[in-house]
Amino acid sequence: MYVGGVDFSGLSHYLQDAILLLLAYHPTSIRVTIGDGFEIVSDAEIELTETEDGFIPFEVMGFPGTSAFNKFIGSWRSPRNNSVLLTALSRELAVSIITARQRKELHFARGVRTLYRAVPVENETVGTTLRFQPESDVFTVTKIRPAIFLNYFRRLSYLYAGTRFSISADGETQSFQADKGIEDLFAVLASPHRLMHEPISITGEAGDLKLQLVMGFHNGIGDHLCCFINNDLAVEGGTHVQGLQKALKRLRKQWQLPNRMDQWGTVVVMSLNYPHLVWDSATRRRIINADFKELVSRLVFEGTLTWLEQHPDVAAQLIELKTVYFSELW
């Protein structure tokens, strides 16, 4: 029995799950068309595996080594469940997967498979098409405004560098693509501020934890932190944000900058990926991994110092900040 949300929140998770499934296969394009239902077309080639119990990933949850569910760690929800829920919660779901040699087609009505066939093909474009309608007997809301999807796709374009996200509705199509990923997002977020140096861009790893960060000091008030975890946001932050804040405090001390946010604030975009998140509760609003604070702090602090060793001109600019006053700034 489905025990998730049935209102707009539930519908949004249902739609996101379809997108997350395709993202598991590292596509270069995803296009959504909103009409009576939804159509999603992508060059992602979903791996379809037949078992005694049905097809992974649409009828049976995947397990290690079997499906997209185990290749994708970018969802708060278990990626093993994405396609099973899509099948179960759709009034109708049609799947077409084209490989170099075959077109595989599946059709489900209210969670029950009514069709499977595989036919040989030649010279057809490889990819996956999903057509579906949410089950109105489950969801109290079955429509979504294009503007909401546009916002979602714009955000995803920064988190999946180089992937083109498009949405078509009411005869119009809009697309988003950020070839530099979070560097492009940083440029947008930093544009209202007066940056005082070339942005610092670092990557780092500690075991299964992977970090990417872009940051810059500005002459305004406050630290403006945008911290993604597994390509999404923990709405109440958590120990990963505390680790970033600790690193910023250490960096200010290193450069003898005032350790306050009313002068020399920062703009930071940080993206972490980690397969073993610990949440505060079932609502999943805050990350509480005990080791994140020290791990993130160390990766950011040491990574920044290493980057500055390779960019001595920027290091010199940061040291000079403590002698500059607001009245001298452009």
Image (spheres, rainbow, N blue to C red):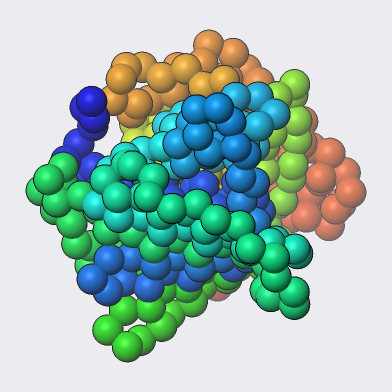
Between 72 and 186, the one lying in front of the other is 72
Residue 85 place in picture, x, y as percent: 36, 38
In percent of width and height, residue 237 lies at 40, 31
Q: Name the quarter where the C terminus is drawn.
A: bottom right
Q: Is residue 110 above or below residue 291?
A: below
Left or right, residue 136 beside residue 222: left
List x then y, in percent, for residue 292: 58, 20
Pick whichever, 197 or 91, lies toward us. Answer: 91
Q: Quadrant location of residue 184?
A: bottom right
- Marker count (numbered): 0
Residue 277 visible here:
yes
Quadrant for the N terminus in the image: top left
Q: Residue at x 43, y 53 (%)?
A: 115
Q: In the image shown, does 144 or 126 lie closer to the viewer?
A: 126
| Residue in view at x 26 percent, y 45 percent | 110
Name the quadrant containing residue 177.
Answer: bottom right
Q: Which residue is pictured at 72% across the width and 51% down the height?
A: 201
The furthest residue to the bottom:
171
At 41% from the left and 59% from the top, the residue drawn is: 94
Residue 58, x across and y down, in percent = 47, 41
